[in-house]
């Protein structure tokens, strides 16, 4: 894709109609603008037209339309925000137009409609509308690579250790799509496993018996399907919880940025952020100690005791008292009495039936946790009875470490709440503090729900495995079972072929990316660094001591190398020859020293066939004259709320 021009009207601080024509001959298009003039807004315009998404800065409003334009309209009047990009792709001409329609209200304008239109010029120079424009654009310029095509120098330059996993996941998805590896991955998922009834293998497996195979086989088959349904249901619920959790995390981040942007609240936000980091470290340490406890138990006890010992210990360590649900007067002693086999009558005089006993038994889950000494005594008794010898001091230290870290995390949480409570009196951020607290409480609640659902899945898996083992024994002798087994073996061979192919190509592409990034870093960075890229496309950049720490300038150069490496890999791939990808950079050089900046600028033409740069600094002394194409300047009013773009370098 080469962008020929971009048009707009009523987009944020660009009130009137405007057009920017871009160089398509390999030269750099430069768009100058001072701080606040609208460079980032125009950068967002590209992404909005193509993807329908805008990442707002923490200090700006989320209105897409120009407020001055809206103010001139009568209430109830309908108006549009409009943008168009004309571009070339694979030898054809395209025009992409996105429109949002609003209706002015008393307090705010409401979006009442939107339209996306993609047109392609035919051989007779007539424009023809393309069906499913989103799918076509996704193929031309995958949204997973959007942050690499549209580089934001302020937000993208970050520590790759922090953003590495998220970036790798997005990159993997996008590259799989571009190299058609997603088709192989889809085939692998479609073939699936025998314990998933919706997959090819799962259907073949359940086909090992017919309706008339006998009551025992039918009963076990029903048990298998019941367990599969439960696992699928809980997995779906976990996915929904994860989705909501991500949304709440975004809300928390946005609110934190809004509060932190207020100078008077910056100190409060820093204290809160530091406490959250401390709390997370304590929780991580506690979780690590729990895993270590499990490892210790596994080395000490017979196999039959392992799962129960670890699960009981984990429950004891994590159990939270919930006295509010317990009826008045209920205690552990009373519950134990009522659950005895020889207790036939409740203290109220009514007979005890099985349903009532089950109801009473549930009260045990609401009991507060035992004390440390009581819990440890129970553990040592079990160890003495069942264990083959154990290190008492080691186990005791692990349990203490869990409890100490959990208590420390609780102290941090308490201080965070105290900070929030004190800031609620500040009217300017009261709603923000309350909103963030609600979102964080919901995230914690979702985490508990996810843990509970995972626990149910883990309990169902051994049961499913046992039922499948019995099912195999009962069906291995009949003809239908043998035929199904042969088909399963064939499909498993196909699955191995696809899995090997996916692994091989993933390794191949990750190595290519590693070489590309290393070469670019060697040319752009003034200090030596080593690059490694995993099969999952996670990138690490380290020195000879395996240290990942970098200065802001080094972060920036690494980010450039990351982008350049991706674009070079796309350009060099045989299957993608003829396809071109633009690079639109917003404030890319702000963190670089003069040497780094010159090195990066010299390498830019090798990154992509088209480079568009938004800059607050004069680049005419940095980019050679023969590499500069069209030049534009943003001209803004004094309030920085109405701007236009004029051709030429208009700064004096």
Image (cartoon, rainbow, N blue to C red):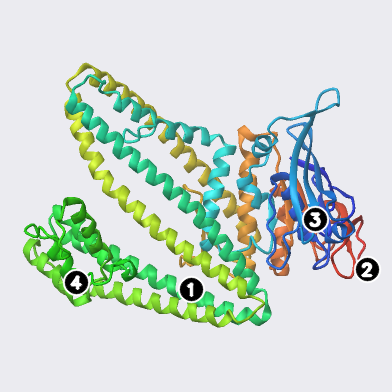
Residue at the outermost front position: 349
Q: Which residue: 48% across, 41% down?
A: 506
Q: Earlier in the sequence, mark 4 or mark 2?
A: 4
> Separation of disc 3 and disc 4 at Cα?
62 Å
- For mark 2, give the secondary structure: loop
Estimate the x, y position of residue 2 in percent, counting from the top left. Answer: 77, 41
Q: Quadrant of the C terminus?
A: bottom right
Estimate the x, y position of residue 403 in percent, counting from the top left. Answer: 30, 74
Labels 4, 1: front one: 4
Q: Earlier in the sequence, mark 3 or mark 4?
A: 3
The residue at which mark 3 appears reads as 65
Q: Quadrant of the N terminus?
A: top right
Q: Which residue: 89% across, 70% down?
A: 638
Estimate the x, y position of residue 343 in percent, counting from the top left. Answer: 9, 60
Above or below for 618 versus 531: below
Estimate the x, y position of residue 517 in percent, counting from the top left. Answer: 59, 53
> Separation of disc 2 and disc 3 at Cα?
31 Å
The residue at which mark 2 appears reads as 652
Q: Earlier in the sequence, mark 3 or mark 1?
A: 3
């Amino acid at each position: 894709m080469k962008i020929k021009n971009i048009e707009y009207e009523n987009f944020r601080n660009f009130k009137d109609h405007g057009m920017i024509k871009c160089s398509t001959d390999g030269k750099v298009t430069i768009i100058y603008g001072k701080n606040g003039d609208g460079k980032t807004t125009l950068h967002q315009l590209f992404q909005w037209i193509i993807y329908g998404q805008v990442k707002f800065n923490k200090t700006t409003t989320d209105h897409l339309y120009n407020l001055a334009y809206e103010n001139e309209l009568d209430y109830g009047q309908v108006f549009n925000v409009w943008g168009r990009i004309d571009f070339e792709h694979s030898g054809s001409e395209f025009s992409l137009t996105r429109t949002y329609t609003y209706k002015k209200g008393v307090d705010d304008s409401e979006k009442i409609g939107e339209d996306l239109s993609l047109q392609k010029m035919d051989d007779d120079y007539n424009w023809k509308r393309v069906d499913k424009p989103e799918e076509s654009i996704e193929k031309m310029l995958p949204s997973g690579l959007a942050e690499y095509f549209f580089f934001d120098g302020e937000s993208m330059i970050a520590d790759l250790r922090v953003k590495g996993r998220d970036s790798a996941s997005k990159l993997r998805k996008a590259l799989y799509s571009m190299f058609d590896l997603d088709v192989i991955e889809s085939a692998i998922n479609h073939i699936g496993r025998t314990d998933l009834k919706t997959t090819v293998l799962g259907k073949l497996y359940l086909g090992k018996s017919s309706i008339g195979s006998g009551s025992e086989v039918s009963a076990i088959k029903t048990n298998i399907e019941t367990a599969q349904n439960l696992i699928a249901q809980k997995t779906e619920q976990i996915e929904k919880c994860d989705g909501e959790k991500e949304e709440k995390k975004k809300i928390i981040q946005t609110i934190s940025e809004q509060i932190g942007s207020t100078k008077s609240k910056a100190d409060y936000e820093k204290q809160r952020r530091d406490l959250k980091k401390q709390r997370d470290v304590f929780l991580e340490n506690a979780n690590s100690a729990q895993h270590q406890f499990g490892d210790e138990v596994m080395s000490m006890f017979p196999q039959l005791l392992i799962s129960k010992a670890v699960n009981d210990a984990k429950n004891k360590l994590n159990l939270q008292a919930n006295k509010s649900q317990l009826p008045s007067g209920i205690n552990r002693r009373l519950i134990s009495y009522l659950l005895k086999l020889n207790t036939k009558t409740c203290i109220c005089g009514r007979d005890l039936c099985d349903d009532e006993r089950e109801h009473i038994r549930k009260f045990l889950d609401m009991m507060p946790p035992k004390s440390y000494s009581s819990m440890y005594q129970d553990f040592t008794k079990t160890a003495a009875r069942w264990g083959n010898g154990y290190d008492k001091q080691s186990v005791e230290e692990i349990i203490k470490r869990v409890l100490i870290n959990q208590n420390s995390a609780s102290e941090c949480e308490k201080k965070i709440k105290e900070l929030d409570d004190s800031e609620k009196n500040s009217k300017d951020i009261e709603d923000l503090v309350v909103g963030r607290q609600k979102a964080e409480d919901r995230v914690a609640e979702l985490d508990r729900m996810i843990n509970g659902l995972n626990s149910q899945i883990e309990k169902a898996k051994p049961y499913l495995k046992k039922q499948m083992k019995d099912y195999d024994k009962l069906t291995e002798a009949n003809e239908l079972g043998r035929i199904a087994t042969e088909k399963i073996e064939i499909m498993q061979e196909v699955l191995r072929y696809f899995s090997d192919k996916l692994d091989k190509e993933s390794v191949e592409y990750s190595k290519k990316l590693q070489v590309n990034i290393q070469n670019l870093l060697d040319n752009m960075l003034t200090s030596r660094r080593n690059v490694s890229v995993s099969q999952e496309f996670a990138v690490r950049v380290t020195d000879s001591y395996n240290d990942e720490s970098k200065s802001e300038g080094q972060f920036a150069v690494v980010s450039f190398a990351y982008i350049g490496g991706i674009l070079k890999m796309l350009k060099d791939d045989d299957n993608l020859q003829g396809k071109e990808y633009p690079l639109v950079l917003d404030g890319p050089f702000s963190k670089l020293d003069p040497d780094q900046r010159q090195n990066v600028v010299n390498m830019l033409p090798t990154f992509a066939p088209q480079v568009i740069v938004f800059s607050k600094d004069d680049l005419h002394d940095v980019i050679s004259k023969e590499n500069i194409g069209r030049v534009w300047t943003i001209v803004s009013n004094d309030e920085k709320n109405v701007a236009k773009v004029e051709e030429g370098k208009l700064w004096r």
